[in-house]
Amino acid sequence: MLNPNNSTNACAASIRVNGAKRKLLNGEVVYSSSVRLPESGLCELLGYAGWDFVLLDGEHGAMDALSIDRMVQGCFAGGTAPIVRVLRPNDPEAVMHALDLGAQGILMPHCRTAEDACNFKNAGLYPPEGTRGFGPGRATNWGRISGADYLASANSETLLLALIEDPEAIDNVESIAAVGLDGLWVGVGDLALGYGVGTDRDHPKVTNAAARILAACQAHNIACGYPARNSGEARWAVQQGYRLIGFGGAEQYVMTESRRFLSDLS
């Protein structure tokens, strides 16, 4: 029987490793998918499918704090990293809250300036790298990991990504990349709208903006993300130098396969 007073007999607990961030640091390519509906089972399923991280879309999805809490657990059950896309840019409380619920990273929408990126980095990291307030729960195994041990590793396991999806952000992308986030993500949809070309993500204005984001990321040795429409485009993106590849979402897969099956019968 273990002696509870003998620490040498106790199994040491340690902070959960962020596999997606480790792969990026090793120079590998990271693949992700997303979930909008607040269903933890979808997150678990995507984890079992092999995605490096699942994006919990709190900007466009139907999520509150309780559903994010459950979806984080679903990701962990499936062996994938939960990354939360927060609802609003420049909201340090939303960043802190998602991380305190156990998320291993944040995707911030509409990062337009270097100041936005600095504020985001401060919100996501503990001192001395940032100003994040202290109040973790699940990340410390609900207290099994000491505060000191948690703080020693928390920043290195937190993935901070910013969406570059506004023409203003393209004008500032070099200074944004210099802030030192883990990566910038090309937001093709809003870039197309911002440049007045509707939903044409293949318009030269959008593709030129994407190339500029990629170049800025490479110049500052951070990862760049791209939303691929299919495996062929994903291979192209990797060849270009993108190391964060997103593809669709659980709800999209259900719709696509459902329509394909029913169309084949008609």
Image: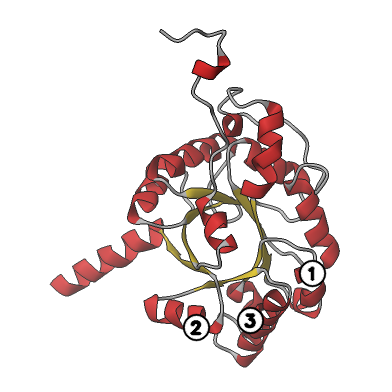
Q: Is residue 122 left or right of residue 265?
A: right
Residues at marks 2 and 3, CA–CA distance in whole angstroms: 14 Å
Q: Quadrant of the C terminus?
A: bottom left
Rendering coords of residue 71 (x, y %): 48, 41
* Disc 1 secondary structure class: loop
Tell me whether circle 2 and circle 1 mark residues in contact (CB < 8 Å): no
Q: Earlier in the sequence, mark 2 or mark 1?
A: 1
Circle nearer the N terminus (1, 3): 1
- Where 100 falls versus 46 (above or below)? above
The image quarter containing residue 26 is bottom right
Q: Is residue 196 visible?
A: no
Where is residue 265 shown, x and y percent of the image? 14, 71
Residue farthest to the right, as pictured:
115
The amino acid beneath tag 3 is Ala
Label 1 or label 3, whichever lies nearer to me, is: 1
* Marks 1 and 3 in Cβ contact (< 8 Å): no
Q: Is residue 30 visible?
A: yes
Q: What label sits on residue 210 in the rendered view?
A: 3
For label 2, the residue is 239
Residue drawn at 35 percent across, 49 percent down: 45
Q: CA distance from mark 2 to mark 1?
A: 23 Å
Residue type highlighted by circle 2: Gln
User: Most extreme residue toward the front, as rendered?
Assistant: 8
In which quadrant of the rendered view does residue 165 lie?
Answer: bottom right
